[in-house]
Image (cartoon, rainbow, N blue to C red):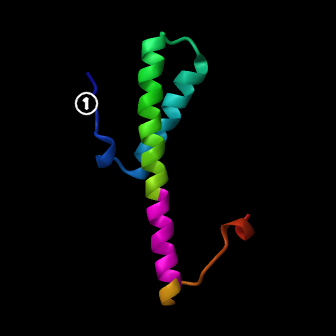
């Protein structure tokens, strides 16, 4: 049996990859209701974790930009 890693112990990349797996399974639509609900709940936790990690990263970049350590940039203009 595969050992479950606590979300808090995961890297952003691992959590995001696991979230993508869950979304794929849910999109297939052939899961029993209880399994789908359990995966949905797990996906919600992973999405919140990933969102918090992105918020933390944004705060670090903003602090660095405010201190003059890096040049500020606009993600919208980078596309």
**Quick check: 45 above or below 75?**
above
Count the marks. Answer: 1
Pointer 1: residues within 10 angstroms few (<14), some, or many (20+)? few
Q: Is residue 63 magenta?
A: yes
Q: Looking at this rendering, what residue extends furthest in the bottom direction?
A: 68
Judge whether residue 45 can be spotted in this image.
Answer: yes
Judge whether residue 18 can be spotted in this image.
Answer: no
**Quick check: 72 above or below 59?**
below
Residue at the spot 31% in from the left edge and 47% down from the top edge: 8
Q: Nearer the viewer, residue 42 or 12?
A: 42
- Residue bearing mark 1: 3
Q: Nearer the viewer, residue 62 or 12?
A: 62
Q: Is residue 13 magenta?
A: no
Q: Which residues are magenta?
A: 54-65
Q: Position of residue 21 (x, y in %)?
A: 50, 31
Query: The N terminus lies in which quarter of the figure?
Result: top left
Residue at the spot 48% in from the left edge and 61% down from the top edge: 55
Residue at the spot 56% in from the left edge and 27% down from the top edge: 24
Q: Position of residue 71 (x, y in %)?
A: 58, 84
Q: Position of residue 75 (x, y in %)?
A: 66, 67
- Main SS category, magenta section: helix
**Quick check: 57 above or below 38?**
below
Q: Position of residue 17 (x, y in %)?
A: 47, 40
**Quick check: 13 above or below 69?**
above
Residue at the spot 49% in from the left edge and 58% down from the top edge: 54
């Amino acid at each position: 049996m595969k050992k479950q890693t606590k979300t808090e112990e995961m890297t952003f990349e691992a959590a995001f990859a696991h979230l993508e797996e869950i979304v794929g399974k849910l999109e297939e639509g052939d899961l029993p209701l209880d399994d789908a609900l359990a995966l949905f709940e797990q996906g919600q936790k992973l999405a919140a974790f990933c969102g918090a990690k992105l918020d933390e990263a944004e705060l670090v970049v903003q602090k660095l930009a405010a201190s003059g350590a890096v040049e500020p940039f606009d993600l919208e203009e980078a596309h």
